[in-house]
Image: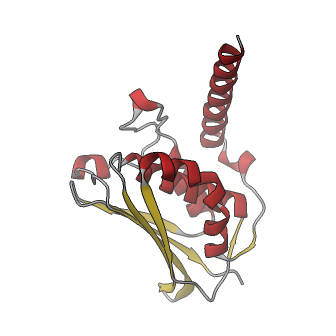
């Protein structure tokens, strides 16, 4: 009976998470958090306890490289939500293990100072058709394994709301690279 209750509790938590994602997608303005000055790599490092089990289960090594001299204006929890989603997706793309490299650097776009976070993995990569749709709401390649198709769409919404951008590059068999750019906090 204890096992059954534990399984029910886990499924209720999963359903609650899906409903919250749907609400966040449907009404992002109601879920907008306050912005604070955040060191991007400190935010990344703060997600490590949250993703440690995913990395271990997938046999994935996470490497952190670089630092930024700038801070960004973004809710720390929202930035960490983006980071966790990107790491989880990379782990799913590497079922036989691999490496995720998160690198940080100062970067300028269109004359605006900011930061760049790059998430590179050694996973299976994506076809051009899949790559073209990854930010579409409800698009997933993991529906049988629990994907809702909202993760990357919500990530884009969170980054766009701060005046930043998120881009992806990928080739089948060659892994993927997600690049986040956020303006410097003033």
Q: Quadrant of the C terminus?
A: bottom right
Residue 146: percent from left, percent from top: 48, 31
Left or right relative to 61: residue 14 = right
Residue 27: percent from left, percent from top: 67, 41
Q: What residue lies at 64% left-to-right and 86% top-to-bottom?
A: 70
Q: What residue lies at 35% left-to-right and 45% top-to-bottom?
A: 95
Camera-nearest residue between 75 and 44: 44
Residue 101's quadrant in the figure?
Answer: bottom left
46 above or below 5?
below
Camera-nearest residue between 14 and 1: 1
Residue 5's quadrant in the figure?
Answer: top right
12 above or below 68?
above
Q: Is residue 158 visible?
A: yes
Q: Residue furthest top?
A: 1
Residue 23: percent from left, percent from top: 66, 36
105 above or below 125?
below
Camera-nearest residue between 52 and 182: 52
Q: What residue lies at 63% left-to-right and 68% top-to-bottom?
A: 45
Left or right relative to 164: residue 77 = right
């Amino acid at each position: 009976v204890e096992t059954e209750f534990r399984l029910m509790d886990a499924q209720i938590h999963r359903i609650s998470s899906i409903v919250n994602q749907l609400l966040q997608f449907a009404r992002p303005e109601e879920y907008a958090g306050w912005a604070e000055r955040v060191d991007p790599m400190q935010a990344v490092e703060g997600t490590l306890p949250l993703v440690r089990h995913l990395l271990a289960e997938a046999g994935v090594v996470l490497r952190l490289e670089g630092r930024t001299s700038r801070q960004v204006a973004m809710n720390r929890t929202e930035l960490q939500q983006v980071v966790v989603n990107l790491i989880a997706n990379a782990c799913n793309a590497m079922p036989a293990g691999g490496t995720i490299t998160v690198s940080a650097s100062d970067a300028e776009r269109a004359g605006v100072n900011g930061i760049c976070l790059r998430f590179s993995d050694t996973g299976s990569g994506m076809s051009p058709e899949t790559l073209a749709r990854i930010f579409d709401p409800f698009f997933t390649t993991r529906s049988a394994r629990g994907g809702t198709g909202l993760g990357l769409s919500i990530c884009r919404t969170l980054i766009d709301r701060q005046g930043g951008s998120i881009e992806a590059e990928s080739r089948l068999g060659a892994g993927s690279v997600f690049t986040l750019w956020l303006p410097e906090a003033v």
